[in-house]
Amino acid sequence: MTLSAKVFVRVHIRWMIRRDLAEVLEIERASSPDAWDELEFLDQLRRRNCIGMVADLHDQVAGYMIYELGKRELKVLRLVVDPRWRRKGVGAQMVAKLVGKLSHLRRSRIWVHVRESNLAAQLFLRSQRFRAVEIVRECYADTNEDAYVFCYALESLSDPSLRSNPLKRPVSQDCERENLPPWSSSSDPVEGDS
């Protein structure tokens, strides 16, 4: 019996542009039972505090994320990996990009909520050092399903080597109930894992 090595692909995380939208919509439909349509994507991306990024693999979209900038946190609205590229490190690289945007001086936490039935997303977030901090009862209008609220928070970074490598940064326990942001979206933002 031979053990196969995990395949890891290197992607380039860049800003989402209009011509990416067709591939993003295709991935969205293949990944989500409550897929956003083009108008929903455009409505979110037109907001001043919303950012769209894609994981570019040889000029193809392997995944994408939409996140909202808050005063003290980032809120993930969507983080989706193309089913063909799951479990190859694409999602982890997108999370690392988000973690790299955190700072103790400004935004120090990332928030995301996940359907109770989306075990793959829950396990993925846990592998990326997110903590489940709250259950929101009957969060999703389409199924009355509960949501788990996950948080990633920075610890103080006294070691300078940790500042340059976001994957080695320690995770804070600073994801307390009083720090939870209000949720405006009722969709499941994380589909697929890496």
Image: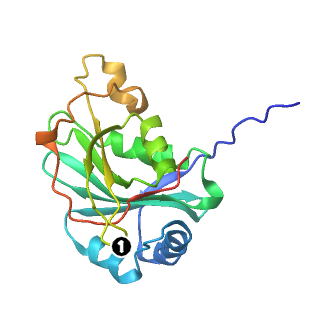
* Residue where numbered disc 1 is placed: 142
Most distant residue in the bottom direction: 39
Q: Quadrant of the N terminus?
A: top right
Q: How is the image coloured?
A: rainbow
Q: How many marks?
A: 1
Taking the image as shown, residue 164 lies to the left or right of residue 5, namely left
183 relative to 39, above or below: above
Foreground residue, 150 or 140? 140
64 relative to 2, above or below: below
Give me the residue at 41% from left, 66% from top: 16
| Residue 54 shows in the view | no
16 relative to 167, above or below: below
Residue 162: give x, y in percent of width and height. 35, 23
Give me the residue at 28% from left, 61% from top: 138
Foreground residue, 10 or 126? 126
> Mark 1 falls on what kind of element?
loop
Give me the residue at 30% from left, 43% from top: 101
Give me the residue at 61% from left, 46% from top: 87
| Residue 59 shows in the view | yes
Given the image, on which type of amino acid does mark 1 rest? Asp
119 relative to 37, above or below: above
Most distant residue in the right direction: 1
| Mark 1 surroundings: few (<14), some (14-19) or many (≥20) residues within 10 A | few
Taking the image as shown, residue 96 lies to the left or right of residue 194, namely left
Taking the image as shown, residue 19 lies to the left or right of residue 99, namely right
Residue 135: give x, y in percent of width and height. 27, 48
Residue 54: give x, y in percent of width and height. 46, 60
Foreground residue, 149 or 62? 149
Looking at the rendering, which quadrant does residue 154 occupy? top left
Residue 34: give x, y in percent of width and height. 42, 72
Most distant residue in the top direction: 159
